[in-house]
Image: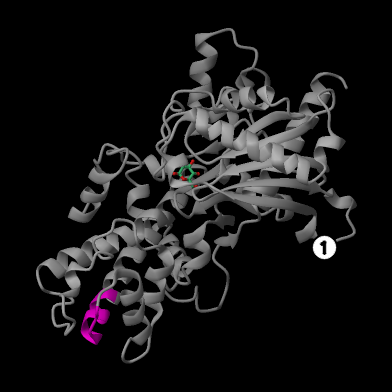
Amino acid sequence: MNVAWVHSLPRGTETGEYLTIDLGGTNLRICKVTLHGTSSSSPPSSKSSLDQEQYRISESLKTGTAEELWTYIAEKLADFLTTKGLDRQYTAQKPMPLGFTFSYPATQDRIDHAVLQTWTKGFDIKGVEGQDVAAQLREKIAQRKLPIDLICVVNDTVGALMASAYNDPDTIIGAIFGTGCNAAYMSSISSIKKLATRSSSSNDDTNPQKKDSTDAKMAINCEYGAFDNAHAVLPLTQYDTAIDAASPRPGEQAFEKLSAGLYLGEIFRLILVDLASQNLLFSTSTSPSPSSSSPKLQTPYVLDTGALSAIEDDASPDLSTARATLTSTLGVTATAQDAQAARAIAQMVATRGARLCACGVAAICGMESIERGHVAADGSVANKHPRFKKRWAGAMREVLGWGDRNVYGDGDESGEEDPIVITSAEDGSGVGCGIICAVEVERRRRVSGG
Ligand code: BGC
């Protein structure tokens, strides 16, 4: 439960031009975000515009050093400024405000500071854990003399919450169901125990608990991917245990390893490998070498969530799509029976994931007594797995006791919407990060009396 130093949802009137970077699992995205606020004549959903570039993050960068990572990011920032002509528009005296979406667990003492607790989602870059990522990036920006001022470091869930609330005031939670899983919400400042510890241990003027009224709010980044790291609550299968043991950080992100997109395909693959090794699958193939020894089937993390949903979604009598997907992704020859079994397994793995994702959100709603609103969700699982949202909604009905509703059907019989529904988040790591940057720039201007 990390304090995110964002004190309010946006008013929707924020304006200005901001630079944002998003260090995602596959790409580094750099954006120029322009917020038009309500002055825009465009419809509410386009109260902002975006000019963006994506740069690939190589596998070697993901397991390299801090020096390599920040040098790469500063180099791409420099390219972006030049390509978009921003290097002529901004100067050292009037730098362009930068927001950094850093979607890893980080402890923040202020909004422009973030000490990485641990890498997640397969990243393993040396020299960053335990360090302030804002300071490390700032140093490289200074070395290159870029006209940029790093204003805020933002988690993707907090960005999703802000970007969505900018357009939809019913937004209560920002959630990511993607490579990783996590959610953020607005908490009452008075109930944040971490801030209470901070105020009793120092005469700290920056502690909002000292100066704000009892109903003041603060965004909390739950980091619930780390729930049950002690492995005390959730039942694990042998496949979950194997994934954890082979990961760069065994014992960490226990909840995420059961439910997030990075792992669903791998859980599925490990089950198939196990069944194939017992000759229960792919053993009747007539191919020259038994397909259970296919190198692709033996390759860790070869399957993404898209393949899983393609297998699950095949409702044809001979399961031709499922069989073709098994062949193209895993190199196995599957009979209709093999495909049937694979489909049932894909269903189980994805259903467990969706139900756990609902538990994370339901826990926030229970704790904060939230009874209605919109959960703005982003991420590959939420967006690309066609059955995820329905399963998630069904589990919410079950966990939150909306008992009269048809749990895995289409809501209640009258067709009435559930009190808490999942919506598609607006772009959190671009626009959301830009909005947070705008709010912080404005706050600083007020504090300095400018
Ligand atoms: C990270 C979170 C992030 C989530 C979704 C997790 O692995 O720890 O900070 O919000 O992935 O991207």
Residue 377, picture quadrant: bottom right
Chief secondary structure of the magenta portion: helix
- Boundaries of the magenta span: 333-342
Which residue appears farthest toward the left when viewing the image? 278
Q: Amino acid at mark 1?
A: Pro
Q: Where residue 185 sits in the image (x, y, percent)?
A: 56, 43
Which residue appears farthest toward the front when viewing the image? 288
Image check: 359 left or right of 70? left
Image check: 73 left or right of 118? right
Residue 407 shows in the view: no
Q: Report crowding for label 1: few under 14, some 14 to 19, many 20 or more residues within 10 A (C-alpha).
A: few
**Image point (39%, 54%), residue name:** 262
User: Looking at the image, how many numbered discs can be counted on the residues?
Assistant: 1
Question: Which image quarter is the C terminus in?
Answer: top right
Residue 102 shows in the view: yes
**Image point (38%, 86%), residue name:** 315
Q: Where residue 387 sits in the image (x, y, percent)?
A: 45, 71
Image check: 376 left or right of 257? right
Question: Front-most of 440 and 329?
Answer: 329
Image check: 355 left or right of 30? left
Q: Is residue 223 above or below residue 377?
A: above
Q: Which residue is mark 1?
A: 43
